[in-house]
Image (tube, rainbow, N blue to C red):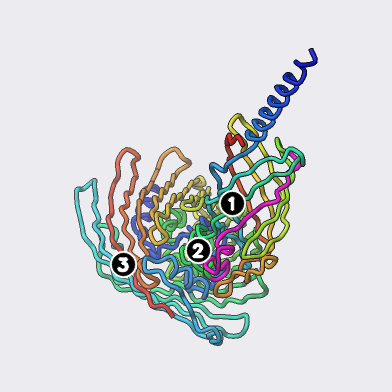
Amino acid sequence: MRSKDLFVAALLVVWYAVEAWASPTMIRLGYTSCAPCHLSPQGGGLLTEYGKGVDLAQSLLARDYAPPPDAPQRKFIQDFRVLLAAYRNVDLTRDETVGSPDVRFWHRAARRLGADHRLSSTVGINFWSDPTTTSARADPKLVVMKALWEYRIADGLELAVGRDVRPSGLEMSDYQDFLRASTEPGAATSYFTQAKLFWWTKRVHVTPFVFGPGGGEDRLFRQYGAGVLGGVDVWQQRAVIGVSARTSRSESYTRQSIGAYARLGFGRWGILTEQELVTRSERTSDAQAVHQYMEDTQVFFALYEWLVTSITMQYGSFDGFASGYVGRLAPAAQIRVSDKVTVIVFARNLFVDPRRPQSRTYSVQLFLKTVD
Amino acid sequence: MAAVRPVKLAAALVGLFITTNLLLAAERYRIEKASIVVTCPMTIGGSFETRTTALAGELALVPEAAGSVRGTLTVNLKTLKTGISLRDTHLRDHFLEVDRGPEFAVATLNEIRINNLNGPGHFSGKLMVHGVAREVSGTATVRRDSRGFRVDASFPLRVSDFQISRPSYLGVGVTDDIQVHVNLTATATEDIH
């Protein structure tokens, strides 16, 4: 099978990562990091009390979040999330349309072990495989997305060890895994075993990390590697510019990447963008190294606090820029009805030829969650 | 000859009076357009901006006191926006207490002195917020044109100086030191006394 075929196949198989719809759009309001609102400085997941307040304040049914003022700090918090979705997947080359539902459950929990330690977990059940493709099928699977020990060493310094998504400049793994998967053949999961250190000040964020296999990979594709992210607030808490680097090795290939990212906010709207150059070399043959370029860019606009529209553009090139191209264009709208209900509507076009889309997916997703 | 001099003198005095008043009248300015951005650093890092365009007032240069500006600038604090509606409400109701009385609903700046009326310089004045008046000072760049002038000014404030409870919400607060940035356009008014 040619490399390009593997590339496209990898895209189609790993097309549908967890659609948790994480997006660091709060840069538009001066939040340069995820730490104010999320328990984990990497973002996503359970919210701090402040985060719950902001989540509720930015809802269509906005109201004050008012926990009891004298309540002791809780040792265990959790929530349950459900995704109910409907997809219409259109293969434009074969003129084939397939509708697919999707149902997913997540349980997210954090247990405080002491003043500075906690255990965090996210466990999910996905009931459908490839729901955004024409090969969608019922295929229940249990997925452990996160199992971390987290230690707050000091203010602005946290160590996390366990299983989780790897750090990235935009922390939009649900979008970015689409292209990343093509640069890591055989990676069966987005969740890797890792140790990562978050260091952040009011202007600078640095995150070095090391990682190992996530589980489920063939022995030949188990990666071991390290990486680092670094970002700086360059303009009045509205512009974070950063760089990233990562290297890994498996029995079948080595991979190195360097990248740059920017998170820009301008009040009601903003831009999130990340580019990466990847070099991958086969270890089992003398084949020439493969160079890939990936770009993820999202322009978002908050029409109202509870209604954020966006358009995400993704581009990946393969085989040294000369041939092999994939792109994705996805306009979307996210409506936060309340702190428990979010609706996302999107249409997504996949291009492997810039002249016309290969496939298109229309979707309505309903996210429900409990609030602890 | 002796009879002509008083007439000429009177005419000169009238002319001087009219010219002076014209000059004085040309030095009155009304705020036509304004933007105020208050940058509020948060205790957990980052910052948010509080904005309004509701700045009004009339200013006049005081010829006998170079650099002094007569008049009052008034900001309607009920129009402040932070980007999150609930936060706007908290800011206005809990911290600025805009409904507590007329002097709480607005911020005023008067007794303004600027050391350079055409170019970068410094300014000072008396700011009243939350019923408390304090001297403030900062930088101001004044650009004059045929219609009036534009001012780009910036100055720091200490929240506690105005007896405002330190804004905080669910463990996240605003630092005591905030920065105010004012951009305004004022056009000349002709008001002959």
Q: Is residue B108 left or right of residue A83?
A: right
The residue carrying pointer 2 sits among few (fewer than 14), some (14 to 19) or many (20 or more) residues within 10 Å by Cα, namely some
**Is residue B113 a member of the stretch shown in magenta?**
yes
As helix, strand or loop, the secondary structure at mark 1 comes to strand
Residue occupied by mark 2: B88
Q: Nearer the viewer, residue B8 or A313?
A: B8
Q: Position of residue B193 (x, y in %)?
A: 62, 37
| Quadrant the N terminus of chain B occupies | top right
Residue identifier under label 3: A366
**Amino acid type assigned to the residue bearing label 1 in the image:** Ile
Residue sitting at x 49%, y 81%: A67
- Is residue B94 or residue B107 the one in the foreground? B107
According to the picture, the residue beneath numbered tag 1 turns out to be A241
What is the distance, in whole Å, between disc 1 and disc 2 at their CAs? Answer: 29 Å
Number of disc labels:
3
Q: Residue at x 64, y 42 (%)?
A: B151
Q: Residue at x 37, y 49 (%)?
A: A328
Q: Which residues are magenta?
A: B94-116
Q: Along the polypeptide, which appears first: circle 1 or circle 3? A: 1
Dividing the picture into quarters, in which one does residue A361 lie?
bottom left
